[in-house]
Amino acid sequence: MVVSPVVPTNHYDFLVTVTKKPEERIRQALEKKTGLTADWQEQQTEIWQLKVQNANIFKPSTNTERRVLYKDGRLVFMNMPISSLIGFIGQKLERPLEDKTELAASYDFSVSAAWMNRQPTDEKTVKPLLDELGLTLVDGTAIHRMLVVHRK
């Protein structure tokens, strides 16, 4: 989301749980609560690309059950696609994360849970975790659909 430099000082939370036109509902809520207008635009943005550094680490899972559990300070992913890890990491980084690994199977792997907190995470914090998995973050750009907020 791209926000106008002049925004109200109040803070608002919006939770949109409808399935019909959720993007329009968030746009309407922004305008009603803040007096700002918003529209969806395609914009080039900086992203992180997740790439494989060492493909030998990943072996397809032989587990039949798919789950994530916490054990001995680690998140253990069983029979999970790499996209599940991207979900955990991507929500912590301050820019979008795209999967460029080409790892299509489901795998068993674990990562330290020490970095999982409510604070944003940067690439330096995530690097040791990714190194352990044979993955790396690479700077990139992509066109993303964003909600651009304007003053009326």
Image: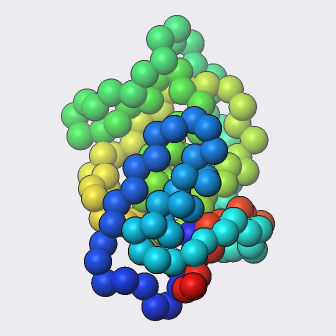
Name above or below for residue 107 compared with residue 36: above
**71 and 83: which one is in front?**
83
Q: Nearer the viewer, residue 21 or 108?
A: 21
Position of 149 relative to 129 (above/below): below
Residue 15 visible in rendering: yes
Q: In this rendering, does residue 47 appear at all? A: no
Image quadrant containing the N terminus:
bottom right
Q: Residue furthest left?
A: 72
Residue 32, relative to residue 73: is it above or below? below
Judged from this view, the residue extending furthest toward the bottom is: 6
Identify the residue shown where x is 67% and y is 60%. Answer: 49
Provide residue 19's location: percent of width, then percent of height: 57, 35
Q: Residue at x 56, y 62 (%)?
A: 27
Percent from the top left, x then y, of residue 98? 66, 54
- In which image quadrant can residue 71 be found? top left
Q: Nearer the viewer, residue 49 or 41?
A: 41
Give the quarter of the figure containing the C terminus: bottom right
Q: How is the image coloured?
A: rainbow
Total numbered circles: 0
Q: Where is residue 73 drawn, in percent x and y?
A: 23, 40
Q: In the drawing, does residue 114 fall left or right of residue 143?
A: left
Q: Is residue 22 left or right of 123 when viewed as pictured?
A: right
- Left/right of residue 47 with respect to residue 33 in the rendered view: right
Q: Residue at x 57, y 75 (%)?
A: 37
